[in-house]
């Protein structure tokens, strides 16, 4: 404790100094002309706090500062621009207002829990899970840099509903394609390709003729496109081969003749360049009395239709580019594959004299 009494002025002077733990540079604060010893002791305590705060400010970043540094490093990683953009958006939106001025090491597990349970109370469970994972990644970065001793992000379980995606039935697919042909809809080739190959929108946009083998009836899918990353690899990062169904062959042969000067298989539409394929699909479906679905649901419709017709799930996964059997199980349930034949064991049961197909009448006593 550095408290000194000046006999000349009959006052106390107080000082406190501490070295920066990394740079070893000293930081000192001093106050003079303090009238009483009790006040001098109080001032000394204030100086200790202020010196440590100043040193901490130079060592420990606030959440806002650390988040900025994290995002800068993220942009030099192997992540896709769309992934980086999504993380940045949710982190800025949900954490800056709450924690922006807090030091990283001051944010506790309770703070994170409060954000998830109260701040995201009405959000979908899947959205909560995603945001929590983003927050965990930021804290992990702080831990790796030695800024914090442990990652305070809690391990929470989320009840993510396994909802079956909206799909078109085989009959509805036929209606869609027939109506599109009748009105000579510009989008007909694009949606026919999606429904017959299960390719994603970005994969269809990037598809070039050198990837299409009409003789072998095969398409090599090894490239995709989006408006943030441009042309890139597929979502899984792997190449795959898709078999061209016979009903699609006439369309591809016609497109080949029409696009002699183009590298791309599908016609380039201005609205497609702007990403309006889903909006155009919904408008057309409504106009012909079919349920509104997303563009991505055409892929689900393709998978469900193949599974319903007995194509082995392993082949559907290979052509669709799915690696996760959990995802495939969603389509299998939609197609009824997981329950198909389950009642076969009941086929031989006695009907107890009741004629099959007739309504049994129950009379009140």
Image (cartoon, helix red, strand yellow):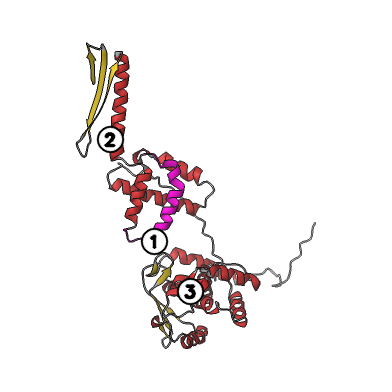
Spot the residue most to the right: 365
Please name the residue that numbered disc 3 is placed on: 198
Pick the front one: 330 or 147: 147
The first of marks 1 and 3 along the sequence is: 1
When asked about the image quadrant of residue 97, the answer is top left
Examine the rendering and report whether any part of residue 336 can be seen.
no
Q: Quadrant of residue 63?
A: top left
Label whose residue precedes the other's in the sequence (2 or 1): 2
Is 320 one of the magenta-colored residues? no
Label 2 crowd (10 A; few <14 / some 14-19 / many >=20): some
From the viewer's side, name the closer residue of 161 and 190: 190
Q: Which marked residue is nearer to the observer: mark 1 or mark 3?
A: 1
Kindly identify which numbered label has been placed on residue 282: none
- Residue 43 drawn above or below residue 273: above
Q: Residue 55 bears which disc, if any? A: 2
Query: Between residues 270 and 234, which one lies in front from this camera angle?
Result: 270
Image-quadrant location for residue 27? top left
Of the numbered discs 3 and 2, the one sitting upstream in the chain is 2
Please give the name of the residue rendered at 32% of the width and 46% of the height, measured from the top-left corner: 142
Q: Main secondary structure of the magenta part?
A: helix
Question: Label 3 to label 2, Cα distance in Å?
Answer: 58 Å
Q: CA distance from mark 1 to mark 3?
A: 24 Å
Magenta residues span 76-102
Residue 207 percent coordinates (x, y): 42, 77
Q: Which residue is mark 1?
A: 81
Q: Position of residue 36 (x, y in %)?
A: 30, 13
């Amino acid at each position: 404790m550095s408290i000194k009494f000046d006999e000349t002025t009959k006052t106390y002077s107080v000082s406190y100094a501490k070295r920066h733990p990394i740079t070893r540079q000293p930081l000192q604060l001093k106050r003079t002309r303090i009238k009483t010893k009790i006040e001098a002791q109080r001032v000394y305590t204030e100086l200790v706090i202020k010196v440590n705060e100043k040193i901490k400010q130079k060592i420990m970043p606030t959440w806002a500062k650390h988040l900025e540094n994290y995002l800068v490093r993220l942009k030099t990683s192997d992540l896709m621009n769309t992934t980086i953009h999504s993380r940045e958006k949710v982190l800025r939106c949900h954490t800056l207002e709450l924690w922006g001025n807090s030091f990283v090491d001051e944010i506790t597990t309770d703070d994170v829990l409060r954000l998830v349970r109260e701040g995201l109370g009405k959000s979908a469970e899947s959205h909560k899970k995603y945001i929590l994972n983003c927050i965990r990644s930021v804290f992990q970065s702080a831990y790796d840099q030695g800024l914090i001793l442990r990652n305070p992000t809690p391990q929470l379980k989320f009840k993510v509903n396994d909802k079956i995606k909206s799909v078109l039935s085989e009959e509805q697919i036929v209606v869609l394609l027939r109506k599109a042909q009748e009105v000579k809809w510009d989008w007909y080739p694009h949606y026919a390709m999606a429904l017959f190959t299960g390719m994603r929108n970005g994969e269809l946009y990037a598809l070039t003729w050198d990837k299409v083998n009409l003789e072998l009836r095969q398409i090599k899918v090894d490239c995709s496109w989006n408006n943030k990353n441009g042309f890139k690899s597929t979502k899984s990062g792997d190449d795959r081969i898709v078999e061209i169904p016979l009903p699609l062959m006439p369309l591809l042969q016609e497109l080949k003749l029409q696009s002699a000067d183009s590298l791309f298989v599908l016609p380039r539409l201005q609205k497609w360049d702007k990403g309006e394929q889903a909006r155009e699909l919904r408008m057309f479906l409504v106009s012909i009395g079919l349920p509104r679905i997303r563009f991505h649901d055409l892929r689900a419709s393709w998978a469900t239709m193949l599974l319903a017709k007995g194509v082995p799930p392993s082949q559907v996964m290979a052509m669709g580019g799915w690696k996760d059997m959990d995802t495939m199980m969603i389509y299998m349930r939609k197609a009824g594959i997981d329950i198909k034949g389950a009642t076969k064991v009941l086929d031989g049961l006695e009907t107890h004299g009741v004629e099959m197909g007739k309504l049994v009448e129950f009379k009140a006593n």
